[in-house]
Image (cartoon, rainbow, N blue to C red):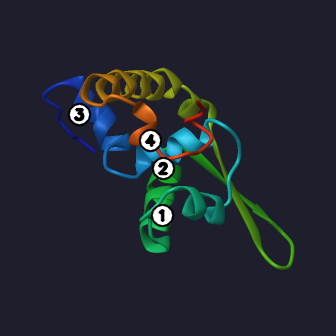
Amino acid sequence: MNKKYNVAVEATLDVIGGKWKPLILCYLTKSRKRQCDFLQNIPNLTQKMLTQQLRELVQDGIVNRISYNQMPPKVEYELTEYGQSLQKVLDAMCDWGEQHIKKMYENKFDVLEKNVFNQP
């Protein structure tokens, strides 16, 4: 593959860009997850889109897919060591988003959903 980038950030966005991948990765920084965990915690994410995004992240070496040989079938996802190297990028995105919310809104909890990331 002879892909050319204008700036290095394009390479980052090529792998983790879009609406869903950063959210999926943020949840995986906490622990292994099953598909149902993502669907319960990320509003408007469809099964089809989740499957597509996870496949791409696995293909790019960011996420491991762990399939257990049992009935009913069980599959979990976790960050690879390479995927864990994105922690600083995700933290920076969260920090910037937090500052943006503080700048734009009186109370950040008026605009942030209650979840594992947004504790008062």
Image: 88 above or below 17: above
What residue do we see at 59% from left, 62% from top? Answer: 40
Identified by mark 1, the residue type is Leu
Q: Nearer the viewer, residue 10 or 43?
A: 43
Marks 1 and 3, the one that precedes in the sequence: 3
Residue 46 horizontal/vertical position (percent): 45, 70
What residue do we see at 48% from left, 20% from top? Answer: 88
Instruction: Give left or right: position of 119 versus 22.
Output: right
Marks 3 and 4, the one that precedes in the sequence: 3
Q: Nearer the viewer, residue 21 or 94?
A: 94
Residue 106 horizontal/vertical position (percent): 33, 28
Residue ranking furthest to the bottom: 72
Mark 1 or 3: in front is: 1
Which residue is under mark 3? 10
Image: 102 above or below 69: above
Quarter assignment of residue 104: top left
Residue 36 horizontal/vertical position (percent): 64, 66
